[in-house]
Amino acid sequence: MTAPAPASSVDDDLWSAIGDPTRRRIVDLLLADGGGTASSLSRQLPVTRQAVAKHLDVLDRAGLVRSTTAGREKRCEVDAAQLERAADQLAAVGRTWDRRLQRIKSIAEAIENTQKTDSTRS
């Protein structure tokens, strides 16, 4: 039996969904227009309506986009709460990397100071 994966504060499905530049552009367009359909979005992108529909499905599964059906039309809009969650996660990742980089800087400065001290003793 394998051990369960450690819990992560970052949702891999969410980041996988918005890791694609076309999907990020779709989210931008939906935010700017207040929503849209695969057809309306495909007119603003260099991809087919079918490709946009597939991208919307990925965003929907990640919870970033909600869709409603009216007749034959499927209208999509960004889920603001999920987008805020994504922004919070990105900020947390940024803070983690800032701390890591600060530690690296501190170590490098300590090594540099030690080398300067050693060279002045010689």
Image (spheres, helix red, strand yellow):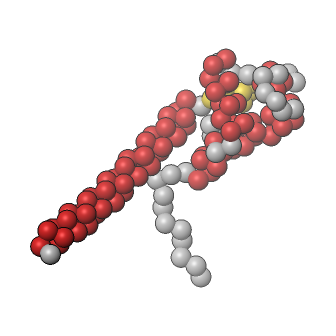
x and y, in percent, of residue 76 in the image? 71, 27
Q: Could you tell whether 115 is left or right of 58 in the image?
A: left
Instruction: Kindly indicate the quadrant of the structure image that contains residue 2.
Output: bottom right
Q: Is residue 112 above or below residue 12?
A: below
Count of numbered tags: 0
Q: Residue at x 36, y 54 (%)?
A: 101
Q: Could you tell whether 99 is left or right of 72 in the image?
A: left
Q: Could you tell whether 44 is left or right of 77 in the image?
A: right
**Front residue of this view, candidates 13 and 92:** 92
Q: Is residue 49 above or below residue 59?
A: above
Q: Is residue 22 visible?
A: yes
x and y, in percent, of residue 97 in the image? 41, 52
Q: Residue at x 59, y 53 (%)?
A: 12
Instruction: Kindly indicate the quadrant of the structure image that contains residue 32.
Output: top right
Q: Quadrant of the C terminus?
A: bottom left
Residue furthest front as drawn:
122
Q: Quadrant of the N terminus?
A: bottom right
